[in-house]
Image (cartoon, helix red, strand yellow):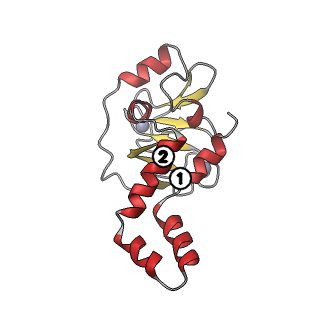
Amino acid sequence: MVCPACQKEMVAKDFGGVMVDVCEDGCHGIWFDWMELCKLDEQNEGLGNALNNALTHERANDENRGQIKCPKCSLLMHIHKYESAKEINVDECYACGGFFLDSGELRTIRDNFMSEEEREAYTQKLLDGNSEFQKAEDALDKDKARDEAIRKYTRFMRLSYYCTGK
Ligand SMILES: [Zn+2]
Ligand SMILES: [Zn+2]
């Protein structure tokens, strides 16, 4: 499979029972098929040299990279904050559920992993501090406005739903 960020050939690696694709000769990005990332996003998950290796790579600056195409579906991937570690922008393919992480992002995700309770508290804080959400909440149709605001600013249920019962 070709790396969606730098077009180099990726190599399949065993991160302790989970096979992922690593861009070894290029940008050190990692491809996770559907459900694979949530098996590796906490510090106690996964093991082995390949994983340890991947965790040593420097964090890449992907701020200005723009959208990339899913290496499996060729559709544009969506950039959004990772649900369990909000400071990280990840690329997700909404069609196949795959994730692409730039170099160093897996380590940052694992270092900043938030539990479900922490995630909910964080989301609430985000909503409380958001003036557009406040305005929406003050609007006449409160329930509908609230739903829309939540949909717009967070997608925190999505991955926790996928990962339930892992
Ligand atoms: Zn690459
Ligand atoms: Zn895809």
Please state the horizontal and vertical placement of residue 24, each as a whole percent of the image: 43, 26
Cβ atoms at labels 1 and 2 below 8 Å apart: yes
Going 52% across and 72% down the picture, which residue do you hit? Answer: 146
The quarter of the picture where the N terminus appears is top right
Quarter of the rendering occupied by the C terminus: top right
Q: Give me the C-alpha separation between circle 1 and circle 2.
A: 8 Å
Which residue is disc 1 drawn over?
Answer: 156
Q: Quadrant holding ligand 1?
A: top left
| Quadrant of residue 143 within the rendered picture | bottom right
The residue most toward the right is: 165
Residue 65 visible (yes or no): yes
Residue 64 image position (x, y, % from top left)? 30, 53
* SS label for mark 2: helix
Q: Is residue 88 above or below residue 111?
A: below
- The residue labelled by disc 2 is 119
Chain-order first, disc 1 or disc 2: 2
Does the rendering let one see residue 26? no
Q: 109 or 94: which is nearer to us? A: 109
Q: Residue at x 48, y 13 (%)?
A: 49
Q: How many numbered marks does the figure carry? A: 2
| Residue furthest to the bottom | 140
How crowded pointer 1 is (Cα within 10 Å; few <14, some 14-19, many 20+) is rated as: some
Disc 2 residue type? Arg
Amino acid beneath label 1 = Phe
The percent position of residue 23, horizontal first and vertical second, equals 45, 31
